[in-house]
Amino acid sequence: MGAGCLDCRGTRFFTAALLVAWLATAAAPSLAQTQSRTYRIGVLNEALAANHPAVAGLKAGLRELGLTEGRDVTFEIRFTEGDRAATREGALAYAKAGVDLIFTSNEEPTRQAMAATTTIPIVFTLVGDPVAAGIVKNPAAPQGNVTGIASLSPELSAKRLELLRTLAPATRRVWAIYEADDRISAAAVANATAVAAQLNLQVLARPVETREELARALKQIRPGDAVLAPDRGRFDIPGALLDLSLASRIPAVFPASFYVGYGGLASYGADYYAEGFQAARLVARILRGARPQELPVEGADKLDVAVNLKTAAQLGLTVPRKILLRADTLRR
């Protein structure tokens, strides 16, 4: 796996859309110079705490655009800990309150926000494939009241498997556990499975419908196996796989560097904070008066390879020099 093989920065229709969005933003006047009131942004995600990296990135991006929290914008944050009913209630509450914009992370909060309102603008992040998720039909020309940042997660899953094979060359079986109704993770697993034979690997796909099924699937993982973690979902499968990896010395590759910061072996994908920062441009344009359907969905413009060297040593793995040179983030 050479450096160029992992250097897949953006795909298909997203590249041109990102350029158009950047040029329009650069040419526009500062929102802080034109507004006369404070805008209310409702934040909806499935996080376990309010300080989600995507929200921190959004706030930082808006500050850079001249929007000060408390003066120009306020944030009403609901984190639902993966509870679908709480996510739906949060979306309905924002719609009833008439916030100026809803900022979401992940597919489920985005879909719930779309179900709650067809008029309040919605800007999403951490959606692996917005077409497969049924959020937009055409990313270059989204319809309705929604646009955002696509993480490109399914398209990167094969590269994650390749990274795993390079870091743990003795591995032969790789478990891919994901929620049964998660179309994004299912597509990611399919992409990884398509290249597994070329890497002399067997991908064991395990869709689960309940936390009990998740617990049973985790018990089937044996020493010598490895795991390919999905994006975050209601059951926090990545968190469960991280705990298993550290407790049982199981190599694991994740979709975002967030998990590497907590001890995960490696990751390849969009950075949560960077996605929120990138989304701030879309949010600012909408608050200035643009309609979501005028703003193409953008692909994440920051994709990182991250490796935790301490975890690699604990797993008895030697990180090849080509990975050391290629990695954007090395945790020690």
Image: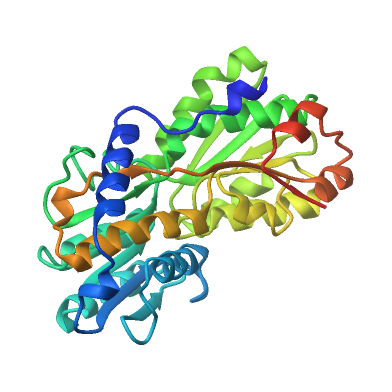
Residue 174 in the image: above or below residue 33: above
Q: Looking at this view, name the residue that lies furthest to the top.
A: 198
Q: Is residue 213 left or right of residue 263?
A: left
Q: Is residue 102 left or right of residue 313?
A: left
Q: Residue at x 32, y 62 (%)?
A: 109
Given residues 60 and 273, the one toward you in this image is 60
Q: How many marks?
A: 0
Given residues 319 and 19, the one toward you in this image is 19
Q: Residue at x 25, y 79 (%)?
A: 39
Where residue 184 sits: x, y (%)?
39, 41
Where residue 129 sits: x, y (%)?
35, 40
Quarter the N terminus occupies: top right
Q: Is residue 15 visible?
A: yes
Type of colouring: rainbow
Where residue 122 sits: x, y (%)?
23, 62
Given residues 220 and 311, the one toward you in this image is 311
Given residues 295 and 49, the one toward you in this image is 295
Residue 126 in the image: above or below residue 56: above
Where residue 104 sits: x, y (%)?
34, 63
Q: Residue at x 65, y 39 (%)?
A: 227
Q: Is residue 38 left or right of residue 206?
A: left
Res. 267 image quadrant: top right
Q: Residue at x 21, y 62 (%)?
A: 286
Q: Is residue 268 visible?
A: no
